[in-house]
Image: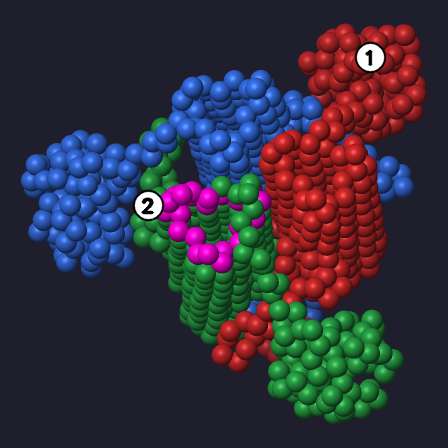
Chain colours: A red, B green, C blue
Amino acid sequence: MAYTLGDLARVAHATLRGDEKAEIEGVAPLNKASAREVAYCASPRYRALIPGSAAGALILQACDADLFAGNVLLCADPRTAFARIASVLYPPEKVAPDRHPSAVIHADASVAPDVAVGAQAVIEAGAILESGVVVGPGAIIGERCVIGSGTRIEARVVIMHDCVIGKNCVISPGAVIGGEGFGYVREPDGRWLKVPQLGRVVIGDDVDIGANTTIDRGALGDTVIGDGVKLDNLIQIAHNVKIGDHTAMAGCVGIAGSAVIGKRCLIAGGAGIVGHITVGDDVEVTAMSFLKGSVEGPGRFSSSLPATSADAWARNVGRFRHLDELARRLRRAEQTIKQILSGGKR
Amino acid sequence: MAYTLGDLARVAHATLRGDEKAEIEGVAPLNKASAREVAYCASPRYRALIPGSAAGALILQACDADLFAGNVLLCADPRTAFARIASVLYPPEKVAPDRHPSAVIHADASVAPDVAVGAQAVIEAGAILESGVVVGPGAIIGERCVIGSGTRIEARVVIMHDCVIGKNCVISPGAVIGGEGFGYVREPDGRWLKVPQLGRVVIGDDVDIGANTTIDRGALGDTVIGDGVKLDNLIQIAHNVKIGDHTAMAGCVGIAGSAVIGKRCLIAGGAGIVGHITVGDDVEVTAMSFLKGSVEGPGRFSSSLPATSADAWARNVGRFRHLDELARRLRRAEQTIKQILSGGKR
Amino acid sequence: MAYTLGDLARVAHATLRGDEKAEIEGVAPLNKASAREVAYCASPRYRALIPGSAAGALILQACDADLFAGNVLLCADPRTAFARIASVLYPPEKVAPDRHPSAVIHADASVAPDVAVGAQAVIEAGAILESGVVVGPGAIIGERCVIGSGTRIEARVVIMHDCVIGKNCVISPGAVIGGEGFGYVREPDGRWLKVPQLGRVVIGDDVDIGANTTIDRGALGDTVIGDGVKLDNLIQIAHNVKIGDHTAMAGCVGIAGSAVIGKRCLIAGGAGIVGHITVGDDVEVTAMSFLKGSVEGPGRFSSSLPATSADAWARNVGRFRHLDELARRLRRAEQTIKQILSGGKR
């Protein structure tokens, strides 16, 4: 469906320079957009592509506006404006509320009339699926789960018994919600005695969970994911973790048991957070860093080392393995210098 | 089902102070337990909650016993005692040995009469499922696999052809057992020639495998997981790895091909172990550490750096990149000092 | 099927010392091979097993050839020769082009006559499956996907709508191709606004993707995986990443959005690569390293630290946290020494 540039300027909170009646029906990259498409430039890297763009309109910052002869949507943050416009031009696809005949829906499940259920899906006894829920092919909704209205459970997701998912969430393919927590005590002979995992996973509204991400159920009490949390792919959330509202985590992050993460935190890819610690609101952890103790927010924390040439790296690593000794030698050198200066040693 | 405190004291190897006839039917956290529930305290952090607890009994160490006026189960290790009691109060749910009509069970599979098979599951030709096995919805058991008695295969697990799983294991949702190992040789032009992966995965008894964890089949010979091994979620075990009995690994660990891990090891979250090395018994590897060479046990090994404020971190990283140079400068300074002291330089 | 040693010598580009008519029908490890099997030795570690091997032939380097009295296939690189021979002796199993009656194949999908479809699989509308494709049990092929001839989609793989997979690929169990990219912009109040993910995943020919690996679809434009790329298990490839031909990545690697990786690169296990950077051809990144900036190839890059005894490690880490200060102290000591030498300070 097409929108006029005037409409899109309002959606994007942008100032239009040009034809407010021009019709736009899609978005595209700067160098590929055509007359009925809009593109954006948010980085000096791509500025050179502005003058030659064939786009029907460009979303630009003021500093770039003069580079383009055509229609311009002027704003302070082109990427956000672009996101707003793209959201309007590409609304989430409406899924017809069909239930594929191959799906297995237990007679004791409570499924709203407009829920869509894909092929080979399974909905177990006692599950409650509210209005507008979409269950993808092969997804499995366990006994007594509650899935809030408008939530999309994608292909092959597993939600284990008794978990609660809020409204308007998206759970990406292969994610596992509510697997057993990793809880054991060790017997004197080294064997592991399992601690029953009796809690649930409780997920708020507007939460996105990435592909093949795993969130374990609580041991005693629940694992809790706040509203608006966004988790990328292949993330591990252990039992009894709490994640505050609007926190985002990139791929391959691991959070150990009972960690409490604040609101609006940013945990970059590959980072690890140990168990039983508290992370304040608005904390940022950089990629591949290892947060080992509680921290207050706001603040930015890091422990990752950027790669260099392997040869230079090996030399520095060799030195690192003697760093304590090196520090002691420096201390001795400083003391000797002091004695020389005081005349106490010659 | 309710137990008396007297019974639970015996189960927990604890000394009862109080009413041995009191009935307990569940467990709960210290601050939520009611008169028919038991709670525990194993950490000074939660000691303040002891006096006000409404629990029917508390599991406490001797040093905390006087803080509580009610029934007390006294023991040296409250968490272990709690685990024993919870295991009795919450035995694994009995699954009725039903086979869902949507499951596909090959006529040439050998499935014991009391095996339960969930909706949409697939059991291929030649598979052998012993007594009491539970196959979750959507799980796939490949050709000629053997699943030992009492083992639970959860939703959407894949076990590829010819793999062997022992008795009383739990394979969590989404795990993949027996995928092809990552074995290639490189042609001079950079192309990769696949090495056929001809082995199996052979898993012992009482093994737990976490959600979305992957264990590859051997190239020549098998990948072998010993008895009592516990693997958390999102772990990667490459081809021909051997893991000794009762070793435990936390989430996001990666073990490269042909590594041999000893018994009773503890591999913490996010750690990586390179291929073709040998790790002795009772070795501990700390979280996010990188074990690059063989080590003997017992011992504790680490290479992870804890995060600090990103600004301070950046300064130290900058120095690290010149650590070899810094060490050389220190050596020169030491030599100059020596010469000064010997009067050889002024 | 058996081959003569003469045939296998030709396959392996090896020189035969022995009976060219001897028949071989399998491969086995050095110490287990029997008269109709071939084994290889590529490492001094296993040389001691050569003289006692009962193999029908051994694949050896010249330096080891005299250790064995039987038939020898002489070559410079026994592992590659072994791979060639094993590929001939163990060709990929032919799968009968059956379509299991439980599979759901949409009437509007275009499926070549010789395609095999496993139990409980789902093929959505508009999907195109070329000749010889094998779809494993429980796999899901989304709307309008194209799967090239000879490609094997294993159990429980998900390929989301509109993705394109080349010829002769192997997608291992549980992999998710084409999940939504992790794209958001942040509102001033901390909420996340989703950026529609409008691209696809486009995968070349001869690509292998490991178990539970995830590859996200592009935001604008596509995520692109070149020909001959080999990805191990539990790898995360974010939206709009490009990976050049014949690059290989080991388990647990994470590649952030819009990174461009060159041809023939080797990314070892657990490494992380940040977004929006360019990695040249023939770049190697060592295990658990963190590549944070663009690099040109060829070259080898590292930032991982090998584990040592945890006590020694802790002392060095303690020093590392003061490395900047230590470097400043060294600078001061050097200056003082200089002043002493120049007579300017006593």
Q: Is residue B142 left or right of residue B17?
A: left
User: Please, which chain is the residue tagged with disc 1 on?
Assistant: A
Q: Is residue A8 left or right of residue B278?
A: right
**Image coordinates for residue B292, horizontal then vertical, percent:** 46, 58
Q: Which mark is residue A2?
A: 1
**Image coordinates for residue B27, horizontal then vertical, percent:** 73, 73
Spatial CA span between label 1 and label 2:
56 Å
Quarter of the picture containing the N terminus of chain A is top right
Dominant SS of magenta comes to: loop
Residue tagged 2:
B198
Q: From which residue to which does the magenta span run?
A: B105-126
**Image coordinates for residue C68, horizontal then vertical, percent:** 12, 52
Callout 2, which amino acid? Leu
Identify the element where label 1 is drawn: loop
Q: Is residue B150 left or right of residue B162?
A: right
Residue occupying image coordinates x 14% and y 54% = C54
Membership of B271 in magenta stretch: no
Quadrant in the rendering for residue A231:
top right
Residue occupying image coordinates x 80% and y 20% = A89
Pick whichever, C248 or C192, lies toward us: C192
**Image coordinates for residue A304, horizontal then vertical, percent:** 64, 52
**Are the residues under marks 1 and 2 on the same chain?**
no
